[in-house]
Amino acid sequence: MQENRGVWVYIEQNEGKIEGVSLELLGAGRKLADKLEVPLAGVILGDSIRHLSDEVIYHGADEIYVIEHSVLKQYRTESYMKGVIQLAEAYKPEIFLYGATPNGKDVASAVATDLSTGLTADTTMLDVDVEKRLLEASRPAFGGNIMATILCKKHRPQMATVRPKVMKALPRDSSRKGRVIEEKMDLREEEMRTKVLEIVKDVTKPGLADAHIIVCGGKGMGDERGFQLIHELADVMGAGVGGTRDVVEAGWIGHDHQIGQTGETVTPKIYFAIGLSGAIQHLVGMKNSETIIAINKDPHAPIFGVSTYGIVGDAHEIVPLLIKQFKEAFKKGGEKTHA
């Protein structure tokens, strides 16, 4: 175990574009690597993706491991797993981070199984015990009622998948220099057990993760009719609409609008938290919003602990006043900031 050194980030790319969560993980990985006094490396696989190496270095990496192969043109568990394992066995990282995306979780679990190491899923906080060189990967547990910190004491690399939007990418610095290590992989298409026959793209409108303003309502809105105030306020501002798990389970809004541990993680410029208490499983999904405005009758509600501004009062009285004020403001020449 002592020979394992370095912090690695799996760089997920899609059609030659790096996924945002990978850049976020480079920011988190940079902090861990600096504490451990080891290099930060990116790992990228694909076909004709060598040119992406510079961007990985510009966002904090000291070095990047690259495998280019025609077999890696589209993501498949088998081919990507073999590439990542080849690199991990050759260079022996100490910590290996992946984005908690469908592909990231898929390849991470396959790699962890083959390397006989642990994997903490859907992490929302990362730190490191420098003396023991242990990754401290924290995530909500027991329905989101507590935060559990999970350690992998006996096996390496220590691995975790991290939810998008919970870490912050470093500013792009094109003056940074780094080392590019290119590796070959002996793999043929005819050896693959799966084939990509067709890729069908989802052309539905962007989800809450891309919204600049979000109005989120909780059970404090009373019922489905009361929840319509959330829609009205969002409509006035051109904002996205979110809901807590309780609201989704009650059928007031669809699951694709759920924010929190089992829903979306969002980082809008403005987040209205209305009629919701601020349970930890909800805070996980929105606490990194730039400005949080909370409305709740209970002055001791946990949501006020993370809010930029708080209004103590009945949402059914306050929200109609906000709707009226915003409508008047826009009539006087203001413009909506669409989500």
Image (spheres, rainbow, N blue to C red):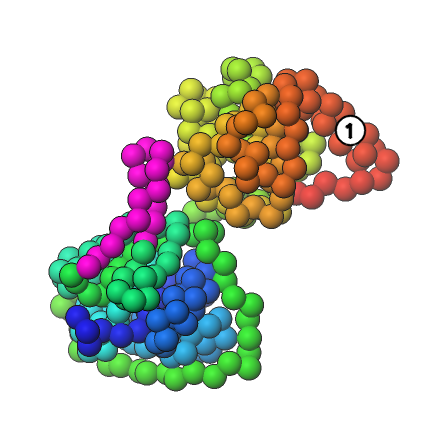
Q: Secondary structure at mark 1?
A: helix
- The front one of 180 and 29 is 29
Residue 90 in sight here = yes
Name the spot of residue 192 as percent of width and height, x first: 16, 64
- Would you say residue 80 is visible in this rendering? no
Q: Which residue is mark 1?
A: 325
177 or 197: which is nearer to us?
177
Looking at numbered disc 1 in the image, what kind of residue is underneath it?
A: Gln
Residue at screen point 39% across, 39% down:
261
- Provide residue 194's location: percent of width, then percent of height: 19, 58
**Where residue 285 sits: x, y (%)?**
46, 42
Q: Measuring 51% from the left and 32% from the top, which residue is drawn there?
A: 302
Q: Residue at x 39, y 23 (%)?
A: 249
As displayed, is residue 329 above or below residue 158?
A: above
Viewport quadrant of the N terminus: bottom left
The range drawn in magenta is 137-153
Residue 116 shown in magenta: no
Neighbours of disc 1 within 10 Å: few (<14), some (14-19), many (20+): few
